[in-house]
Image (cartoon, rainbow, N blue to C red):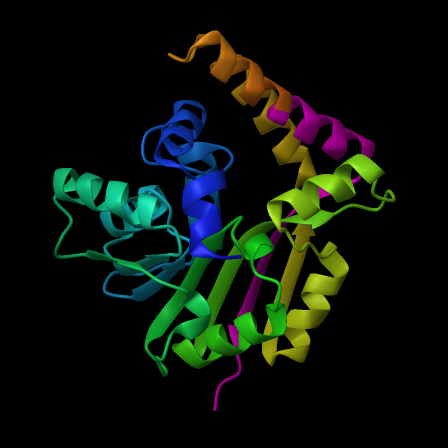
């Protein structure tokens, strides 16, 4: 995945703002603030902790973690469009003393034992080399630090040719929930937890389809997004695509 692909195709400024009409202000992942709160609650955050938010998008989860839990958050995103918009939102949130934002490739991070928690929502599908990713994340965490992330996954049903074509077009690399948990364990994480939360995903997709109908978008934009959401819903209901929530602890030294 390259910055150019994200900025010029999947996440142009217009497409970001259109997605935001569905996900909610400052959000670019399923369920918006409601699901963000549910996920953040699994991280066991405490005031003054340091959090790395990989694929921070428009900053919604970072702002929420800082404002709700009193933690310091550093957000990184490969998309320059995302970071540019997120920085304007950060100024309005008045959290400049708690949140920093950076455009960059998380695989190029050069940090050691810095963060108490690494958070990411539906981003790792963009990254092919998952082993390298978890190596970088482990290096960035303090001993006993926590990784928590959600991601699109392969389901138990064999992928249709249409789904495989979609993955190629988006340059997505998916694992199933079981393989993700094994990869985390092989990367040195303990207390690894992986759960299929497709039930929440399906419910969320249906709610977002209703939101889409009321969104301030033209008919062409609504039609395009409706098709994307309907296709995701169909894949999830068939069992081709699932939604995994994962966590792991870096081994204590």
In the image, residue 114 lies at what x, y percent? Answer: 32, 77
Residue 196 in view in this figure: no
Question: Is 244 included in the stretch rendered in magenta?
Answer: yes
Q: Nearer the viewer, residue 177 or 91?
A: 91
Q: Is residue 173 left or right of residue 214?
A: right
User: Considering depth in this image, is 6 or 202 the residue closer to the camera?
Assistant: 6
- In this rendering, the answer to whether 242 lies above or below 21 is below
* Extreme residue in the bottom direction: 253
Judging depth in this view, the residue of 125 and 70 nearest the camera is: 125
Q: Specify whether residue 211 is painted magenta.
A: no
Q: Is residue 240 left or right of residue 193?
A: right
Which residue: 63% across, 51% down? 172
> Residue at image x 32%, y 29%?
25
Q: Is residue 32 above or below residue 148?
A: above
Q: Residue at x 48, y 76 (%)?
A: 136
Q: Which residue range is magenta in the image?
A: 228-253
Residue beneath the point at 48% across and 17% down: 221
Choose top left, top right, bottom left or bottom right for residue 51: bottom left
Quarter where residue 71 is shown: bottom left
Q: Is residue 9 above or below residue 233?
A: below
Residue 3: where, in percent of width, then height?
A: 43, 54
Q: In the figure, is residue 103 to the left or right of 186?
A: left
Spot occupied by residue 206 in the image (x, y as percentages of width and height): 61, 20
* Image quarter of residue 175: bottom right
């Amino acid at each position: 995945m390259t910055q150019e692909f994200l900025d010029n195709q999947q996440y142009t400024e217009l497409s970001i703002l259109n997605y935001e009409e569905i996900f909610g202000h400052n959000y670019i992942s399923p369920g918006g603030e409601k699901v963000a709160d549910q996920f953040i609650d699994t991280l066991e955050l405490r005031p003054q902790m340091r959090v790395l938010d990989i694929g921070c998008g428009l900053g919604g989860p970072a702002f929420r973690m800082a404002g709700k839990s009193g933690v310091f958050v550093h957000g990184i995103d490969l998309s320059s469009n995302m970071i540019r918009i997120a920085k304007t939102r950060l100024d309005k949130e008045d959290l400049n003393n708690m949140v920093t934002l950076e455009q960059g490739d998380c695989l190029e991070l050069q940090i050691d034992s810095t963060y108490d928690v690494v958070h990411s929502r539906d981003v790792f599908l963009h990254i092919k080399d998952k082993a390298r990713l978890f190596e970088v994340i482990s290096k960035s965490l303090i001993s006993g630090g926590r990784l928590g992330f959600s991601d699109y996954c392969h389901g138990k049903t064999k992928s249709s040719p249409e789904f495989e074509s979609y993955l190629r077009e988006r340059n997505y690399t998916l694992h199933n929930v079981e393989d993700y948990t094994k990869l985390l364990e092989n990367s040195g994480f303990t207390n690894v937890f992986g759960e299929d939360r497709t039930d929440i995903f399906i419910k969320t997709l249906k709610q977002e389809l209703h939101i889409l109908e009321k969104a301030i978008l033209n008919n062409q934009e609504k039609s395009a997004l409706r098709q994307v959401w309907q296709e995701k819903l169909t894949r999830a209901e068939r069992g081709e695509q699932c939604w995994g929530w994962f966590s792991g602890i870096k081994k204590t030294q």
